[in-house]
Image: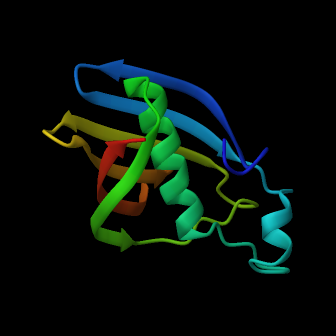
Amino acid sequence: MQLKDFYTVNNVAVADNLATANITINKDHEIFKGHFPGNPVTPGVCMMQIIKELTEGVVGKKLMMQSSSNIKFMAIINPEQTPDLVLTLDISETEEGYKVKNVTKFDQTVALKLTSNFIEK
């Protein structure tokens, strides 16, 4: 885990190439003291790191992001109001590594959509 104690994985279910992860963001993490004081917002780069780490857990390999596209931050993830997230990872193997299509939600709100390509480290 790149950011120590930033989030907790509550469970991960994998069926075929579809993984669903339930996580909880730690509202007391140091990063929120600077992003932003009094109005915490989960940084997008941290969400991208979480997706990479969850994918690594599913495929059982260390990965490096090669590219990302269709990145859409659609709602602010405030860890004080909505710390519990559901991430859906549609993982497919490619010639170079793995392609992941992600949708991240809290409650019924879509917060993030992205597609990333990963290669093995």
- Report the residue at 60% width, 39% height from top: 23
Above or below, 92 against 64 in this view is: above
Q: Quadrant of the C terminus?
A: top left
Where's residue 69, x and y in %?
Answer: 26, 67
Q: Nearer the viewer, residue 93 or 10?
A: 93
Rendered location of residue 83, percent (x, y) = 67, 52
Q: Is residue 29 left or right of residue 108?
A: right
In this view, the residue farthest toward the left is: 95
Residue 68, located in which quarter of the rendered image? Answer: bottom left
Q: Position of residue 6 (x, y in %)?
A: 73, 50
Q: Is residue 12 left or right of residue 35?
A: left
Name the side, left or right, on which 108 lies relative to 101: right
**Given the current orientation, which residue lies at the most extreme front position?**
121
Q: Which residue is depicted at the point 55% across and 72% down?
A: 76
**In the picture, which quadrant includes the N terminus?**
top right
Question: How is the rendered protein coloured?
Answer: rainbow
Residue 37 lies, in percent from the top left, at 84, 80
Q: Is residue 27 above or below residue 69?
A: above
Left or right of 16? Residue 71 is: right
Which image quadrant for residue 92?
Answer: top left
Residue at x 19%, y 43% (from the top left corner): 96
Q: How many marks?
A: 0
The residue drawn where x is 42% and y is 21% is 13
